[in-house]
Amino acid sequence: MSSFEKIITCIGAGYVGGPTMAKIAEKCPQYKVTLVDINEARIHAWNSDQLPIYEPGLEEVVMAQRGKNLFFSTDVVQGIKDADIIFVSVNTPTKTYGQGAGRASNLEFIEKTARSILEHAEGDKIIVEKSTLPVRTAEALERILSTNTKGLHFDIVSNPEFLAEGTAMTDLELPDRVLIGSHETPEGLKARQTMVDIYANWIPLDRILTTNVWSSELSKLTANAFLAQRISSINAISALCEKTEADVDEVAFAIGKDTRIGPKFLKASVGFGGSCFKKDILNLAYLSSYYGLDEVAAYWQSVVDINEWQERRFVRNMLTSMFNTISDKKIAVLGFAFKADTGDTRESPAYTVVRELLEEKAKVVVTDPKALKNAKLDLADVADKVDFEEDVYKAVEGAHAIAIVTEWKEYKELDFDRILKSMAQPACIFDGRNILDHDALYQKGFNVFPIGKTAKTHF
Ligand code: NAD
Ligand code: UGA
């Protein structure tokens, strides 16, 4: 007989499952929390000193709870048998084959999990959708689970995750909100209350929102779509700024002062990356066309289209600014991670930038303080054409241009006098994140090309 009040199992020990369950274990010592995964290497890493993902503050929590009320295992079956509550946090990538290829979510992993639960469960359970899923996925899960012949009852609850990489632990400590979607039947409301009770261990009740299942599923896709839409909107305006001598940072500041708009997520950039924005918007667009709403699909699709255009526009600007040829010119790409403070490169704009530069036959060198290993994997097919360099000063030596693609703090603190002397002249800097002091660089002798601001050139 376990001395724990509740047994929680999470299927999928990735970027979401790991930090989320570590936080629950930290805040609820009365629960036993086990993460299970089919990826043996990942589980091995979770049980070692080298955790499989880097998040500030995560290691401390894992080290404090591991072996007490936080466990990592490859035994998915036992995890299912033991649990009162099963969080499902498996990956839901974009489908690459068949109907909906390139747009729809690949639901293979989530469905396999449901079938495993069906096969191995020996008691009633609450099943929590933690993965980001198309609206009405719970219906499919219910249909699968209701075929059980053991007389078991399963409640499906939607509890999407809103954490951002790099700030996962602080996001989980005090989230803007926790969202719990359940059916509004007596059993559904009881499952909802069980979920509220977990989070109420550390989150104020007014931040725990409850809705029906479908609203909860759709809110997750909508939140990501709205966030990405703000970036595409300001990036679209950045192009207009470059034509009109307006300054995109000034425009963003001015509109952000309107409390109805607000200041966040208005930083113009070379484009948004990350594992989810693109996949979730494509999924939203696919779902809309599935329901016959082609105009809605086209509207959301345009958010992704503008993003891809912005990435290519960045390279096109480099080309035209460097006298319409970059063939054989050395270009130093500073940053390959999709954002600062992570080694994650999934859907990073750097991926497109490097490939477009190679199309123009540039000699590309990539540097990044945390993501060089992933950059090498992402560029494996063109590795013979790209140099990877840990030392940023070596990376820029002899370069005709620098492209800032990730907003690493250390790039703001570089010795640009030293850099200018080591570069080919005229030296150009394309600041894809607007993090540098453009006036100061221009005074030193650089030709500076920001995003959404007039270029400062000596020629
Ligand atoms: P991930 O790829 O890092 O982790 C998923 C894990 O699930 C993998 O380790 C995989 O081996 C495991 N898995 C797959 N099928 C399994 C099975 N049948 N049994 C056991 N384990 C299985 O993915 P992630 O980044 O953690 O994302 C998970 C979900 O959360 C996705 O739906 C994503 O959209 C969503 N999400 C991600 C983030 C983020 O910042 N990464 C934020 C919010 C929501
Ligand atoms: C995003 C959301 O912020 C999370 O709420 C969500 O849970 C998560 O996706 C998910 O579902 O996976 P994440 O992708 O980790 O989180 O990181 P963000 O901080 O949102 O940045 C995404 C991209 O947008 C980065 O490339 C970033 O550089 C870019 N960005 C962000 C801008 O270009 N401008 C901005 O103003 C903000």
Image: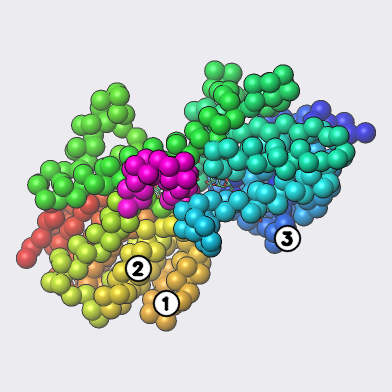
Q: Is the magenta stretch mostly helix, strand or loop?
A: helix
Give the amino acid at mark 1: Val
For the point 10% across and 60% down, the residue is 457
Q: In which quarter of the image is the N terminus?
A: top right
Q: How far apart are marks 1 and 2 (CA)?
A: 10 Å
Whether ligand 2 has any atom under 8 Å from the Cβ at mark 2 is answered as no
For the point 29% across and 71% down, the residue is 357
Tell me: residue 445, above or below residue 218.
below
Within 10 Å of disc 1 (Cα), the crowding (few <14, some 14-19, many 20+) is few
Q: Distance between the residues labelled 2 and 3?
A: 33 Å
Secondary structure type for disc 1: helix
Give the amino acid at mark 2: Val
Asked if the residue at tag 2 contacts the one at tag 1, i.e. Cβ–Cβ closer than 8 Å, the answer is yes
Residue picked out by circle 2? 354
Tell whether 444 sits left or right of 20.
left
In the image, 120 versus 312, the foreground residue is: 120
Outermost left residue: 459
Residue picked out by circle 1? 382
For the point 24% across and 47% down, the residue is 236
Residue picked out by circle 3? 40
Between disc 1 and disc 3, whose residue precedes?
3
Outermost front residue: 292
